[in-house]
Image (cartoon, rainbow, N blue to C red):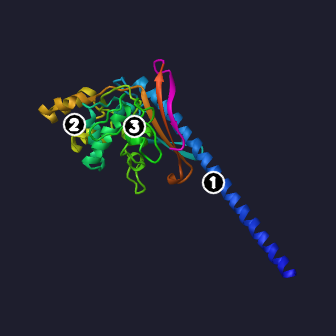
Amino acid sequence: MVLWILTFLTVMALSFSLLVRTEGYSSLSFKNETENKYLAEAGIQRGIMEIFHYNANKKLKVVIDGSETIKTDGTEYSGIAGKGHYSFRIIDESGKININALSDNTRIIFYNLLVNYGLSGEQAETIADSVLDWKDSDELHRLNGAESDYYMSLPEPYKSKNKNYDTIEELLLVKGITPEILYGDEEGKSGIVNFITVHSNINRINLKAAPREVLAAVPGFTADLAESIIMLRGEAPEEIILHLKASLGKSYDESAPYIGAEDSNIYTIEATGYMEERKKGYSIRSTVITENNNKAVRTLYYKSPA
């Protein structure tokens, strides 16, 4: 009886010890995640402040040292808040491919993005046609596309939306698109989510803000030309256009309908907060629009964690 009682008490003590240890680690993990989350929020607010500063000073020809504006092409910046750190980057939505503005005449830029990403021509054709079919107003599918008849035949059926996309995540419902294509894979390859948008109010690709992947998808552009445009972003927009005309020659007319150098008033801010290790940080993505002559912002999209 004594041995059984001792065994029982030992098991109880070990169980209680394990429970306390688990609760302790859980509380510590929750504390760290909460701290990182608010550091990421600090990065979002810093990004909003920098957007105000950028819009108020982007037309100045003389910049005072220390008051330089940030870049809106996804360049990463960092900051310190107390004992923590945050990184943030701002992307003008006009530098992305607006899938709501795609048509049969302009789908080639989205097709090129998919092929450059690594998809086969057949896969890219299926996705490009299906993306257009999802948002058009009819039930007639394109050669490689899909409408409600296809989606209703799936194990979990649903109908084609036949309206514009409200969020990028809707693409996961479209034939051919997988989470790996949209967000990236476990091996570290990024997805196409950073190169497409549903929020841009400008239908041309902003050369001053577009990532190199988007620039390389413009008809007539090459990877080297895209890189040279990025190197010229400190110059006036007119200089970039002149460089393009000189580089493309007669082919410039092929690219001209897809490109411009006009900023929008819609920006995506991606921020990560972390105390020590960046890999254990917390990330947030927020898309905002500036209003009232750059005096206020309104959130169009918010994802936490991202």
Residue 149 visible at all: yes
Residue at which label 3 appears: 148
Q: Nearer the viewer, mark 2 or mark 3?
A: 3
Q: Quarter of the image holding residue 111?
A: top left
Identify the element where label 1 is drawn. helix
Q: Nearer the viewer, mark 1 or mark 2?
A: 2
Residue 212 visible at all: no
Task: Name above or below for residue 258 compared with residue 32.
Answer: above
On screen, residue 158 versus residue 29, left or right, reads: left
The amino acid marked with disc number 2 is Pro
Q: Residue at x 66, y 56 (%)?
A: 26
Magenta segment, which residues? 292-306
Give the numbered dot on residue 219.
2
Q: Quarter of the image holding residue 2?
A: bottom right
Q: Residue at x 71, y 65 (%)?
A: 18
Q: For the residue carrying disc 3, how many other residues have a C-alpha within 10 Å: few (<14), some (14-19), or many (20+)?
A: some
Identify the element where label 3 is drawn. helix
- Residue 246 is situated, as x and y percent measured from the top left of the image, at 15, 33
Q: Earlier in the sequence, mark 2 or mark 3?
A: 3
The amino acid marked with disc number 1 is Ser
Residue nearest the observer in this picture, 263 or 65 = 263
The amino acid marked with disc number 3 is Ser
Give the numbered dot on residue 29.
1
Q: Residue at x 35, y 33 (%)?
A: 99
Q: For the residue carrying disc 2, how many other residues have a C-alpha within 10 Å: few (<14), some (14-19), or many (20+)?
A: some
Residue 30 is inside the magenta segment: no
Q: For the residue carrying disc 1, how many other residues have a C-alpha within 10 Å: few (<14), some (14-19), or many (20+)?
A: few
Quarter of the rendering occupied by the N terminus? bottom right
Residue 299 is inside the magenta segment: yes
Task: Name above or below for residue 103 compared with residue 150.
Answer: above
Identify the element where label 2 is drawn. loop
- Residue 13 is situated, as x and y percent measured from the top left of the image, at 78, 69
